[in-house]
Image: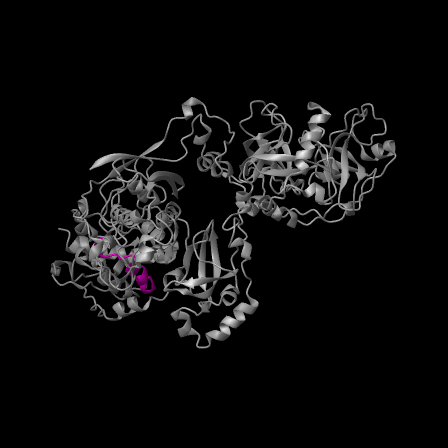
Amino acid sequence: MHCGLLEAEGASGQEDSDFNWEEYLEEQGASAVPHSAFKHVDLGLQTGLSPGMKLEVPLRDSPDTYWVATIITTCGQLLLLRYEGFHDDRRADFWCDIMTADLHPIGWSRQQGQLMKPPEGIREKHEHWETLLENVLSEACSVPANLLDGPHRGKNPLDLLAPGASVELQDPADTAAAWGATIEDNVGGRLCLRYAGTEEMAPTHGKIWLFYLHPLLHPPGWAKEHGCVLIPPAVIRDVQRDAKWDEVQQQISNQKHDGTVAEGLKLKDKIPTSAHCFTEGMKLEAIDPIAPFHIRPATVTKVFTSMYFLVEMDELRGNSSGRGGGPAFLCHRDSVGILPVQWSFKNGIQLTPPPGYQGQDFDWADYLKQCGTEAAPQHCFPVESSVHSFRESMKLEAVNPLSPEHIHVATVTKVRGQYIWLNLEGLKESLPEVIVHVDSMDIFPVSWCETNGYPLQHTRKPKAVLKQRRVAVVQPEKQDPPKASLSNAPRHQASSQSEYAGQNNGKYSCPKIYFNHRCFSGPYLNKGRIAELPQCVGPGSCVLVLKEVLTLLINTAYKPSRVLRELQLNEDMRWQGHRETLKAKYRGKSYRATVELVRMADQVAEFCRRTCMKLECCPNLFGPLMVLERCSENCAVLTKTKYTHYYGKKSKQVGRPPGGQTNLKGGVKRAGRRRKKRKHCFVHKKKRSSASLDTSPGGSPQASGEDEDDLDEEDSLSEDSSSELLDDSEQSEWKSQPVSPTPVETPPHQRRRRKTHSPACLDDENQPSVAKKLCLDSSPLEWSVADVVRFIRTTDCAPLARIFFDQEIDGQALLLLTLSTVQECMDLKLGPAVRLCHHIERVKLAFYQQYAD
């Protein structure tokens, strides 16, 4: 055996890329604002395809025949589909890549004269499937044809707004004016725009950052279509001669309509705008657009249309009327940043007087009288709601208003109605708290910058804190498992050559990867969780599909960190493929591992097989082959503790602990007060030792530095969750097993070792627990999974027998179970777990007394 190192994620450093949100939140004891709170971010990820839409797809066994399918889930360019007629049955769900699959809108087959016929499983369920088809064709919500064909296929709006594309910007102070701009960068929908005519200026001059849903952003030709005048905005008007601006204006006018950009900005136009009832001269409160740290008095100085009006911040220096004079901005009824008079007072916020105000304490009544005007009525503003997900101390990412190219770690310090106050971290110079609306498009969820490859500004830690934290693990030496040839696969294993090699989709397209949950799952993966995975993933890009497969497998592990360790990149791998970082969270810690994924379709089968070998499971557990009946590896005979023979390892035997110790109250007293370390299997307590991370296989004895009497575990699923019905094959196997014999109480002096192989049952359950005795007819070390199941079925925990069957717990594994492992591994509440552990402890006590000499 040798020691290795597994690096815990989040070792902070001076580089922005080393900042880790999960570790930061854990250190701060804070929580992140939910991702769902940022509506503008979610809109940017939509491809237009949503669950419930229907389309026509070819049958997998008959590509010339089509049938209707419903979108169940979308994952980028991958779609999870279900044939119409299967209703809630998800066993036949399948994935497809919208970029390569043969997909069509409803009605296409009839227009093209293509045959429509359901799969065999639907024909068996619906004798009159023709009626079903007619109902679907007449009532279905079809996928729009433009989303399945042409340049927009499989792309979200963000993909259509590429750097170099031209747009038009409406003037922020005049709805009748606009000017052209070019997209220089697109960061997750946040566009860096350069005004037309400023290309030869300094890199920082003439730039503006806007989210693509901003109401002032339009496609080329919008100004001409809406009768707007092309005028350079005031911020750049003085940097060029009039002749130069006339030349640029002509270039903007001659730009052709760009359908791609128009499609990318199409979603923006769907946001409704209501008519307003403001009139010129009305007073209100507004967040200063230049310095959004203050709320100041403002005035409606101009009404353009029934939809738009102009608001100016009040400026009393050189303007005795108090009607505007400061920074101006275009508004509509639902614009953020404008508030009714007295809003600050009602919410306990200090209102900043306008520059040049002479009084000590600002009073709205005096100010309105001084200006000779009236406040905008309350009904002019939308009804304010406080229903949102932002709470004080929550974390997020926010734009620096004075330096829009920078995005900072931010903390919510105050919440008032629909407005929040943010403290930005990582600033070179301190700033007051920034005031933003909860629907602002300048705030983002945690990890948004990391997802989009953009630097995040954060507080840098002192060097003393930058030391990497590592967790020591013990890795058993492995022998190379025997290689099984794919050519030996029996005929009953389904494998389509066209699917297997991906020949229809090119050499970089991955075929379907099947999860064969009936195969041997090995010591690291939970067989029950694997059974809940979709039947297959793909087809699609090799890197995309394989990453999704490995992510799903990691989530089924007893200890995700252990699986990551097995999958992390080895220097001697023969493929020079794509390196991908996979992450997992386990017991409050985050882990990452760099894995290498293959790019070519002809390497996928070998990659899946080698990955299975790493995880010490059946080589056919997942891969391009679908196991229908019997696995070619005959893995059904393996259990968690028999895998050692399969992989050529030596297993340890469980013997009597020193002094015959037990954790039963009625057992022999322990010598001294020092706690003994218990041996665990499968999963471990939630409070593990920080000095070591166990990595021994799930079914073999392993040391743990934890107390055995830790009863403060969290409640999990209800007891009823363990009594689900078995499938047909499991029921038949159980029914074929004989009922175990009735236990016999034997005096201690008459006990002797038995050589039969059937487990004993419990005594009368109505007797007090301290008086119960158990006589075993055979050593639990020799019990099979079926023997353990029969034993559990004779107790008052019989409904839990299915869990022992699903997780293949044999006698050796049974002896290693403790309260904490039972709670986490079986998702039991404390009460049922204690009852089950009582029976397990009785088996342990009888084993120590009868067979552990």
Quadrant (top left, top right, bottom left, bottom right) of the N terminus: top left
Q: Which residues are magenta?
A: 797-812
Instruction: Looking at the picture, tell me which residue is in the foreground, 722 or 614.
Output: 614
Q: Is residue 284 above or below residue 353?
A: below
Whether 800 is among the magenta residues is yes
**43 to the left or right of 670:** right
- Residue 442 rendering spot, x and y as whole percentages: 60, 37
Instruction: Looking at the picture, tell me which residue is in the foreground, 543 or 414.
Output: 543
Q: Is residue 668 above or below residue 805?
A: above
Q: Residue at x 17, y 57 (%)?
A: 782
Using the rendered image of the protein, determine whether residue 570 is visible from the camera's viewpoint: yes
Decide whether the magenta segment is chiefly helix, strand or loop: helix
Whether 320 is among the magenta residues is no
Q: Is residue 851 above or below residue 738?
A: above
Instruction: Looking at the picture, tell me which residue is in the foreground, 394 or 257.
Output: 257
**491 to the left or right of 371:** left
Residue 466: quadrant of the picture: top left
